[in-house]
């Protein structure tokens, strides 16, 4: 979680209790007024960690829904002919996903699990298309652009600092 997505609310009425609530992706942290800067930082760090762990657990629990959605998209955009394994991983914070062509395994960043479905669909389609084109060639993009929210989703991911997936060995990776 990025600090930009955190809102601190200091309250005179609050004595000791610290509360955190996730409101539309913005973490609202309620702190008692008059807390020292160091102490505030300590609490905020603890809250972030707790929320991150909760998100990670949530993502791991949603592997089933990810698989189901990937099967649907395989059917819709690839004639159901792709074979693959897909799951969330928690060690890809800057990249939205990766596709290992050799063993047909797709790994999606757990951060994507919390994004809107049209963004998640784009990420899945992008990685599925890599099973056919292990690069970012023109042909690859023709395939991915069948999905009408591709441009919008790319903009969304860029704004989240997740514009690319795992390095693809080709000359055209600048356009990832
Ligand atoms: Zn890619």
Image (cartoon, rainbow, N blue to C red):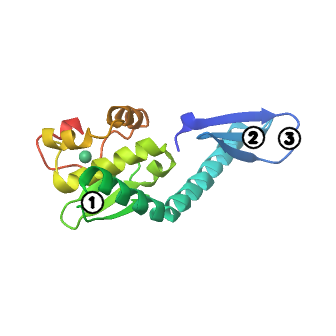
Tag 1 near tag 2, CB within 8 Å = no
- Structural crowding at the residue carrying mark 2, measured as other residues with C-alpha within 10 Å and reported as few (<14), some (14–19) or many (≥20): some
Q: Quadrant of residue 39?
A: top right
Q: Secondary structure at mark 1?
A: loop
Could one spot residue 95 in this view of the protein?
no
Q: Secondary structure at mark 3?
A: loop
**Which badge, 1 or 2, is on the more N-terminal residue?**
2
**Distance of label 1 from label 3 (alpha carbons):** 56 Å
What residue would you read off at disc 3? 14
What residue would you read off at disc 1? 80
- Structural crowding at the residue carrying mark 3, measured as other residues with C-alpha within 10 Å and reported as few (<14), some (14–19) or many (≥20): few
- Left or right of 112 in this view: 21: right
Residue plotted at (66% across, 47% down) = 42
Q: Position of residue 69 (x, y in %)?
A: 41, 56
Q: Nearer the viewer, residue 114 or 161?
A: 114
Report the label total: 3
Tag 3 near tag 2, CB within 8 Å = yes
Q: Is residue 68 positioned above or below 153 on the image?
A: below
Q: Position of residue 98 (x, y in %)?
A: 29, 54
What residue would you read off at disc 2? 30
Residue 36, which numbered label? Answer: none
**Distance of label 3 from label 2 (alpha carbons):** 8 Å
- Left or right of 112 in this view: 1: right
> For the residues carrying marks 1 and 3, which lies nearer the camera in this image?
1
Q: Secondary structure at mark 2?
A: strand
Residue plotted at (24% across, 39% down) = 176
- Left or right of 34 in this view: 8: left
């Amino acid at each position: 979680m990025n600090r930009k997505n955190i809102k601190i609310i200091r309250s005179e009425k609050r004595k000791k209790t610290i509360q955190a609530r996730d409101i539309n992706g913005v973490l609202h942290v309620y702190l008692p007024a008059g807390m020292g800067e160091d102490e505030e930082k300590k609490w905020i760090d603890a809250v972030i960690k707790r929320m991150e762990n909760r998100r990670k657990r949530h993502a791991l629990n949603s592997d089933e829904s990810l698989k189901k959605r990937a099967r649907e998209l395989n059917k819709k955009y690839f004639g159901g002919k792709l074979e693959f394994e897909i799951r969330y991983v928690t060690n890809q914070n800057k990249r939205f996903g990766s596709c290992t062509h050799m063993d047909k395994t797709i790994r999606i960043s757990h951060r994507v699990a919390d994004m809107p479905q049209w963004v998640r669909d784009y990420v899945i389609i992008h990685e599925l298309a890599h099973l056919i084109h292990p690069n970012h060639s023109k042909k690859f993009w023709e395939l991915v652009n069948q999905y009408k929210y591709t441009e919008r989703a790319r903009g969304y991911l860029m704004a989240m600092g997740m514009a690319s997936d795992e390095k693809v060995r080709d000359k055209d990776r600048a356009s990832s």
